[in-house]
Amino acid sequence: MKKITLLLLLVSSSLFAQLEGSWSFTPDAGAMGVGPNPGDYSWWSNNADDVTTRSCLFDDEYVFNADGSFTNVHGADTWLETWQTGVTEEGCGAAVAPHNGSNAATYTVDAAAGTVTIVGSGAYLGLNKVTNQGEDGAPANDTTVYSYVMSADGNSVDFTIQGFNAGVSTAEWIFKMTKNIPDAPSLEGSWSFTPDAGAMGVGPNPGDYSWWSNNADDVTTRSCLFDDEYVFNADGSFTNVHGADTWLETWQTGVTEEGCGAAVAPHNGSNAATYTVDAAAGTVTIVGSGAYLGLNKVTNQGEDGAPANDTTVYSYVMSADGNSVDFTIQGFNAGVATAEWIFKMTKNSDTAGVDDFTTNSVKMYPNPAKGFVNFSSASNEALDVAVYDMLGKEVLRANAVQSQLNISNLNPGMYFVNMTQGTNVSTKKLLVK
């Protein structure tokens, strides 16, 4: 008996987890229907045109949260019927209380019975009028019990309900739903090195970067590298944005010592480049003369900044929230095939801001800065500037900035500078000395 009980608990837990998430009606004919018997929905079912004419219903979300709470999400509108208070004709409109998702609700799963129970004023699955007692949207004790059958992959489910028709006890409604799978985090946008020790490193094996990695002081001494941007645009183009300077090394033409200076061609972002993502392989391919991620010298063939066919392939692992990513690259060390560089980056801003920044050629310098920071752009339009600390707190704001901003009251450290020029918005990191 204990084994059976444990098995049922495990199954219940598994089904609870499978239901977790957001669901909507499957956008097909027959997604909802009613009839005299299970499997027979001949009294009424939606047709293909209803997916469009009732789109405000098909985009509703039925959300099973991990903590056992349940939410109806309607957006701007949902499908209304004349049984509801104040509704004179069927059609799309703002959800009517209590069926507007404003009240707390919960759900529980009974694995043995194959049911899910929704409890809460106005909470429902499928159509708000259908309860276990009738079609008036007023379930006894604010509780409705649905049977359900889920697909093997957990991405679709059929909810059914009975008891609403006193004259035909076997009558049944069916609501066929599909799980709303959130989009995977995207590389699209602007990225920079995470301003921490170990943001870049190299070693003999993946995960072992013992040959060299940056320390905390490098965030300041190499700030011209840490504020570089690696921009993945929505159209598949890729751009290296260096601002006034970047980190230079002596392998580059004309460079006699390491340090900050103007980017050297072809690694100066002046040439067109593209990127392609292979999500299955976990790789991103950069193609273009002088285009790169992390350090310009590192390629799949060596450390001379000259990749074969102007093409470099990086592996990447992105955080669940899409705000940080680790890029890695191999092949640069002929003697140690498993040797690997890692470049840890943090997202700067969305693509719109990046495109605006790049298009309008807004520059912020010097960086690091002390006392003042300067701005210049292709247009002479003034900037509205807001400065935020690493916790997101606004510490400085100035409107109609023409060329220079006084930052003498800021403590040394890393900040985000939000620049608005007309309708264009961009964000850059600023290191204050």
Image (spheres, grey):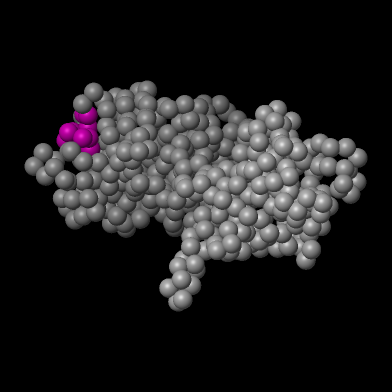
Left or right, residue 373 beside residue 129? left
Q: Position of residue 391 (x, y in %)?
A: 52, 58
Residue 247 appearing in the image: no
Left or right, residue 311 beside residue 210? right
Left or right, residue 11 beside residue 256? right
Towards the viewer: 7 or 291: 7
Residue 301 in the magenta stretch? The answer is: yes
The residue sitting at 21% across, 35% down in the picture is: 300
Dominant secondary structure, magenta: loop
The residue sitting at 59% across, 62% down in the picture is: 113
Q: Quadrant of residue 210?
A: bottom left
Towards the viewer: 317 or 397: 317
The residue sitting at 44% across, 58% down in the picture is: 412
Q: Quadrant of residue 79?
A: top right
The residue sitting at 37% across, 23% down in the picture is: 272
Residue 331 in the magenta stretch? The answer is: no
